[in-house]
């Protein structure tokens, strides 16, 4: 039997692989964006992403224990998450075709900052001064990367920011779902709805252009499988350890995006990313640190100073 430390180490490893798969998916999207619309790519990504999503659901012990039910009480919220994710993907995929890969990816990491802010009106959480300071630091980094008012500023930089907001909104809504609903089932609802939403958006914007050949088909399948597998690995890693143990490694994705963008597209936007990227990561890590402190305080309060250890 694995020890807790072994399981945490494995969970961290799986989450890092998931980040690499997400970035690999982004590289493919950037490659394909020259010939396919963002809505079209979103539809393809979600369609082929249904396979890993279904595997995640079938692997869920909680789902089997509840009689393999596919219906859930809050199905409207589950579908709403899928529609919001469709918008997020549309904006982010468009940004990948217009911005350096690492720039779009780094701005997208503002989702953790948005989640903290959205938790106040949507979840009724109390956010103290330390976490608001963290949000402010992170957003200052985002503004520095976007560079409003500078010659290098482009309105396309707003696209990954809108995507980050939508991804955060989808994440916060997931936390409003019933606690006894298996996470893979929530994910499957969202992915299936995104297939429909992205397909309708594609038709509204002119329709599918048609896959150009076997090569592009291979890239499209890989795109969907990479994205879906990344979600599957994250679900597994979140079930192996506390999310707080994984959150600090979330920002390795910025480094991965920079390296991959440099290797595959000869992009090295150091001047655009620094020091903004450091502030984005610092804001997110400060939120993680503060949440850990609050969790420890709650545990100590529940146990009480009189409790035997």
Image: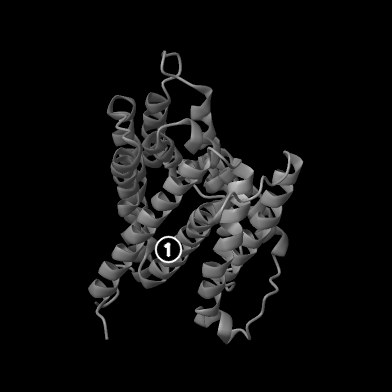
Q: Residue at x 70, y 64 (%)?
A: 75
Q: Residue at x 57, y 38 (%)?
A: 91
Q: Is residue 52 visible?
A: yes
CA neighbours of label 1 inside 10 A, class few (<14), some (14 to 19), many (20+): many
Give residue 56's position: percent from left, percent from top. 51, 73
- Quadrant of the snapshot with the N terminus: bottom left
Give residue 107's position: percent from left, percent from top. 43, 36
Colour theme: one colour
Quarter assignment of residue 44: bottom right
The secondary structure type at the circle numbered 1 is: helix
Q: Is residue 98 above or below residue 124?
A: above
Q: Is residue 160 left or right of residue 1?
A: right
Of 212 and 22, the residue lying toward us:
212
Q: Residue at x 30, y 53 (%)?
A: 249
Give residue 243's position: percent from left, percent from top. 38, 61
Quarter assignment of residue 131: top left
Q: Is residue 273 left or right of residue 149?
A: left
Q: Is residue 278 left or right of residue 104?
A: left
Query: What residue is disc 1 on?
Result: 234
Count of numbered labels shown in the rendering = 1
Give residue 118's position: percent from left, percent from top. 54, 44
Q: Is residue 183 visible?
A: no
């Amino acid at each position: 039997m694995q020890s807790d430390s072994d399981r945490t180490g494995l969970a961290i490893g799986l989450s890092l692989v998931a980040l690499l798969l997400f970035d690999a998916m982004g590289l493919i999207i950037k490659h394909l964006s020259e010939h396919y619309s963002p809505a079209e790519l979103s539809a393809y990504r979600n369609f082929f992403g249904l396979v890993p999503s279904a595997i995640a659901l079938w692997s869920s012990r909680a789902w089997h224990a509840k009689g393999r039910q596919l219906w859930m009480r809050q199905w409207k919220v589950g579908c709403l998450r899928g529609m919001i994710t469709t918008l997020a993907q549309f904006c982010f995929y468009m940004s990948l075709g217009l911005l350096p890969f690492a720039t779009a990816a780094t701005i997208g990491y503002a989702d953790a900052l948005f989640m903290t802010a959205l938790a106040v009106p949507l979840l009724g959480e109390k956010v103290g001064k330390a976490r608001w300071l963290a949000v402010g630091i992170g957003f200052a980094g985002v503004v520095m990367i976007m560079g409003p008012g500078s010659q290098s500023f482009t309105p396309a930089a707003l696209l990954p920011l809108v995507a980050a907001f939508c991804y955060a909104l989808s994440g916060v809504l997931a936390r409003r779902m019933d606690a006894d609903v298996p996470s893979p089932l929530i994910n499957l609802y969202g992915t299936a709805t995104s297939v429909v939403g992205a397909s309708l958006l594609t038709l509204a914007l002119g329709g599918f252009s048609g896959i150009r050949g076997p090569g592009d088909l291979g890239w499209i399948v890989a795109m969907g499988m990479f994205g879906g597998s990344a979600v599957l690995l994250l679900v597994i890693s979140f079930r192996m350890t506390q999310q707080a143990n994984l959150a600090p490694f979330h920002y390795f994705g910025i480094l991965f995006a920079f390296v991959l963008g440099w290797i595959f597209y000869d992009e090295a936007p150091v001047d655009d990313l620094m020091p903004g990227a450091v502030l984005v990561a610092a804001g997110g890590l400060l939120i993680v640190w503060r949440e850990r402190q609050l969790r420890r305080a709650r545990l100590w309060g529940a146990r009480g100073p009189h409790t035997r250890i």
